[in-house]
Amino acid sequence: MKASDAALRVPLIVGPGRVGRSMAAATRAAGFAVELRGRGDRLDDLEGKLVLLCVPDAAISPLAEQIGAAGRPPALIGHTSGATGLDALTGAGAAGAFSVHPLQTVPDGETDLRGCPAAVAGSTPEALEAAGQIAEIAGLEAFEVAEADRAAYHAAASIASNFLVALEQTAAELLAEIEVEDPRRVLEPLVRRSLDNWLSRGPEALTGPIARGDEATVDAHRRALGESRPDLLVFYDALAERTRQIAGRPAIEGSAR
């Protein structure tokens, strides 16, 4: 029996935050007696265990060093960070390191992760297999991301989630400034339909002035922003130029026109 097979019977999650509690809930729902501990709890009895660190990125390496200093290294150790490499776990002294990153926004510890994709990686074939097993147990759909591609993967995830929030909040603020009540409710049908169209049609979902080559309307947008929110002109120009690229329209010389 491989070390990971025995260790998976009672995996240990360190970090009772949003991701840790959500992963623990998903694992328990699958019938596994997962153990959940805090960073300040005892971490000197981990020999032979499979340990998953669900802690902030900056805490991963120091926590791995703390575990390694105890002299009883786990069989395998992993983390749930999308951006942090596996080398952050070397201090634990485990036989292998892995990562399982749920590709989902996790606003609270009761987030249902079932059916979500999850990027996995492993320093050894056994560690990679364990990462896939953990993902499967939690109801996640695993896909492998190479260590060299981790930063690009996380950039894509951040653009898809964090930048989407920033984009829609910017639009909502512009509506609020012209006294439109409840901008999020007003924008919701447009946002949802646009997302659905992109999911089904990809770049062909583009509509609007840039897609149809109506630069006069784009100039009107810029004039309005120049009067009310000049701080957003660079933001608008960058997005407009990227939209031209996707639409196959000619670039406009100069980022600030």
Image (spheres, rainbow, N blue to C red):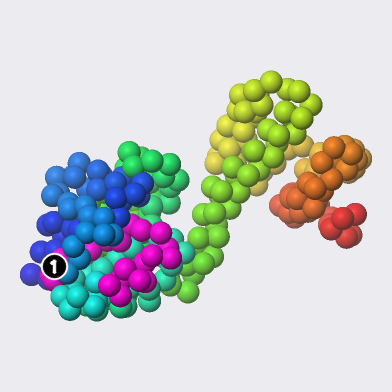
Q: What x and y, as percent, mark residue 2? A: 12, 71
Is 72 one of the magenta-colored residues?
no
**From this viewpoint, is residue 122 visible?**
no
Q: Horizontal placement of 199 versus 240: left or right?
A: left
- Secondary-structure class at tag 1: loop
Q: Residue at x 76, y 54 (%)?
A: 238
Rendered view: 62 above or below 137: below
Query: Where does the N terminus fall, quadrant-wise?
Result: bottom left
In the rendered image, residue 47, in percent from the top left (x then y), is placed at 13, 71
As drawn, which residue projects farthest toward the left?
1
Q: Is residue 48 magenta?
A: yes
Q: Residue at x 14, y 45 (%)?
A: 31
Q: Residue furthest top?
A: 181
Give the magenta range.
45-66
Determine crowd level at label 1: few under 14, some 14-19, many 20+ residues with C-alpha closer than 10 A.
few
Name above or below for residue 113 compared with residue 78.
above
Where residue 34 sits: x, y (%)?
17, 51
State the image coordinates of residue 142 (x, y, percent, origin top left): 34, 56
Residue at x 56% of width, y 35% of height: 196
Residue annotated with mark 1 = 45
Q: Which residue type does callout 1 highlight? A: Asp
Tell which of 113 and 200 is nearer to you. Answer: 113
Picture layout, residue 176 above or below residue 131: above
Q: Can the viewer see residue 198 in this picture?
A: yes
Location of residue 211 by image quarter: top right
Quadrant in which the C terminus is drawn: bottom right
